[in-house]
Amino acid sequence: MSTYSSPADVTAIQLARAAHLNNLDAAVAEAFALLPDETLLKHGTVNFAVDTGTANTYLVSLAQAPASYADGLTVVMRPINSNTGASTINVNSLGVKSIKTWDSNDPVAADIKVGCPVT
């Protein structure tokens, strides 16, 4: 949900009221608070998390939680368990998703290795 208010809502030659400007300023400040921290962006850790699940059932919590899964969402995790076969991931409790290899197959045993980042 966007908190942006279009300036087109203002009529030409209309007196700008302090309350309207204050509301606009507050909306901008609220929107900026949703942006990732500059340090996370610089270090490339916005979508990085260490897994807290079990083998084949990976759980990660991103610092900047997405509102939902979306096409193109990239998550990098460092697993604490190697997989033994087909695996799933749950990002910020958004729901369980199957992990697939680059060719859309299920991973086989040891495709996911302890401590090796997985994208």
Image (cartoon, rainbow, N blue to C red):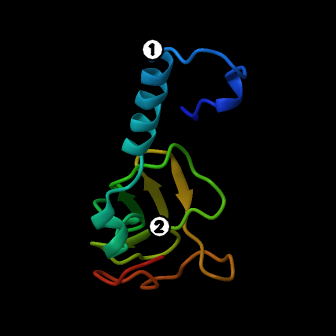
Q: Position of residue 93 (x, y in %)?
A: 42, 45
| Residue occupying image coordinates x 53% and y 70% | 86
Q: Quadrant of residue 30?
A: top left
Q: 5 or 116, which lies in front?
A: 5
| Kind of element beneath mark 1 | helix
Residue positioned 55% across, 18% down in the render? 16
Depth check, front residue: 31 or 45: 31
Residue farthest to the front, as pictured: 13
- Name the residue type under label 1: Ala
Identity of the amino acid at label 2? Val
Report the Cα–Cα distance between label 2 and label 1.
41 Å
With 38 as the anchor, is 19 left or right in this view? right
x%, y% of residue 68? 55, 45
Q: Which residue is mark 2?
A: 75
Relative placement, left or right, of 66 versus 116 is: right
What number of labels is visible? 2
- Could you tell me residue 33's position as x and y percent? 37, 42
